[in-house]
Image: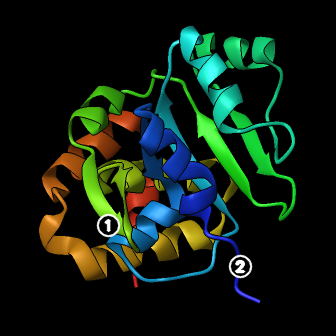
Amino acid sequence: MEPPDLFELFVRPLHDAGLGYMVSGSLASVHYGEPRLTLDVDLVVHLAEADIATLVRLFPDTEYYLPPADVIAVELHRPTRGHFNVIHLPTGQKADVYPSRQHPYWDWAWQHRQLGKTGDAEAYFAPPEYVILWKLDFFREGGGEKHLRDIRGMLQVSKEEIDLDLLDRACAGLGLIPQWHAAQAD
């Protein structure tokens, strides 16, 4: 049995509704790097409180778990680390949704997100530099060799597209130099 398509379950509804999002995390690293299995999708979203009703419509409770509207509203207004999950009940597949706009490179990433193909559909992807910064930050917080493998795969496959000078400056400013060096080591 083939696993459910995370893009169909979570990304396409946002895309078709015209809501602001960009795919980040493992699915974005696969887009820019080497394939690997992942069981969820990380979505950076640009939502207003008025968009919560649209989310409820896009992810109906007969098929999805979506937190109550008031919980989503709290997460939308959280200054940093806003986060909630959407879970597809029949399959258990999950989307991690990040609405916080406080990352120092969030505005830059939003301006540089890229429209890419996913099978027959299109999706917006965070730029590779933002995906790398995201993965370096997660690695700093909790380890996880998979983050470094993903970054190495991205550097191997898409190095020509990646602004390494921007990453050097960003890592210095975000205190991610040790993690950045670890990701670049063989």
Above/below status of 174 relative to 26: above
Q: Residue at x 30, y 34 (%)?
A: 110
N-terminal label among 2 and 1: 2
Residue placed furthest toward the bottom:
1
Q: Is residue 39 left or right of residue 100?
A: right
Amino acid carrying mark 2 in the image = Pro
Residue 6 drawn above or below residue 87: below
Which percent across, then down, holds residue 160? 12, 72
Residue at x 36% of width, y 30% of height: 106
Residue that numbered label 1 is attached to: 117
Q: Residue 103 in the image: state x and y as whole percent.
A: 43, 28
Query: Residue at image x 51%, y 56%?
Result: 25
Q: As rendered, which of 131 and 133 lies closer to the eye? A: 131
Residue contact at pointers 2 and 1, CB within 8 angstroms: no
Expressed as whole percent of the image width and height from the top left, the position of residue 88 reads 79, 53
Q: Secondary structure at mark 1?
A: strand
Q: Which residue is mark 2?
A: 3
Q: How many tags in the picture?
A: 2
Q: Name the one closer to the observer, 112 or 173.
A: 112
- Return the residue nearer the eye: 176 or 14: 14
**Mark seen at residue 148:** none
60 sits left or right of 129 in the view: right
Q: Neighbour class for label 1 at 10 Å: few (<14), some, many (≥20)?
A: few
Compared with residue 75, is residue 177 higher up or lower down, i.e. above or below? below
C-alpha gap between disc 2 and disc 1: 19 Å
Q: Residue at x 64, y 19 (%)?
A: 52
Q: Is residue 81 visible?
A: no
Is residue 135 visible from the viewing direction of this image?
Answer: yes
Instruction: Please name the amino acid that badge 1 sits on.
Output: Lys
Query: Residue 38, image x and y in percent?
Result: 64, 71
Choose top left, top right, bottom left or bottom right for residue 72.
top right
Indicate the secondary structure of the residue bearing disc 2: loop
